[in-house]
Amino acid sequence: MTTATTDKLDIQESLWEALDDSPFVMLARTGGNDHAKPMTVHFDKDYCNTLFIYTQVKSDLAPGGPAMMQVIGKGHKLFACIAGTLSTVTDRAMIDRFWSNQVEAWYDQGKDDPDLLMLKFDMADAEIWEADPGVKGLFKMLTGATMKEGEMGDHAEVAL
């Protein structure tokens, strides 16, 4: 397990890069029986450790509260499980900030659609794995040799 501060910062930066490459996550409120839903997250480094999500008023995410997000990076080189809190965004400027044709495709009346809801996900902590086995690890996997902790890549628990 990686514990050095610089390693944690590197892994945390890898999370942001993974979300930039592929902003698709699975998200569910915790404490209930709701299944995680595929969502697209929007972020800006001006809003440190906050992700924004467009959804519908009738969504099971709409009530907000404690939530858990799973990230699988493009190419399966990063995996993360992020705990945080969902809350409603009412500021029209924030709704406008991340609006795009891809978002608009989900809402018949655009930004004035009565079913439009923006949520923010304030991240509390994360567990992040980087999958990079290196040559030795690849050889072990190909030959069926026993992998040891750390040979598959880095791992960190990060307070965000």
Image (spheres, grey):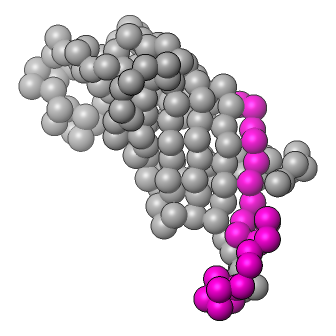
Q: Is residue 150 magenta?
A: yes
State the residue in front, 130 or 140: 140
Q: Please tell me in which quadrant of the rendered image residue 58 appears.
A: top left
- Residue in view at x 43 percent, y 20 percent: 32
Could you tell whether 139 is left or right of 79 in the image? right
Q: Position of residue 45 (x, y in %)?
A: 60, 35
Q: Position of residue 26 (x, y in %)?
A: 42, 40
State the residue in front, 101 or 15: 15
Could you tell whether 66 is left or right of 109 in the image? right
State the extent of the magenta-drawn residues as a range.
Answer: 138-160
Q: Please tell me in which quadrant of the rendered image residue 54 appears.
A: top left
Where 77 falls versus 126 (above or below)?
A: below
Q: Position of residue 107 (x, y in %)?
A: 15, 26
- Residue in view at x 51 percent, y 56 percent: 73
Could you tell whether 130 is left or right of 17 in the image? right
Q: Quadrant of the C terminus?
A: top right
- Residue in view at x 49 percent, y 13 percent: 65
Inspect this view and state whether residue 4 appears.
yes
Q: Position of residue 108 (x, y in %)?
A: 9, 25
Q: Is residue 50 magenta?
A: no
- Residue in view at x 66 percent, y 55 percent: 129
State the residue in front, 157 or 108: 157
State the residue in front, 108 or 153: 153
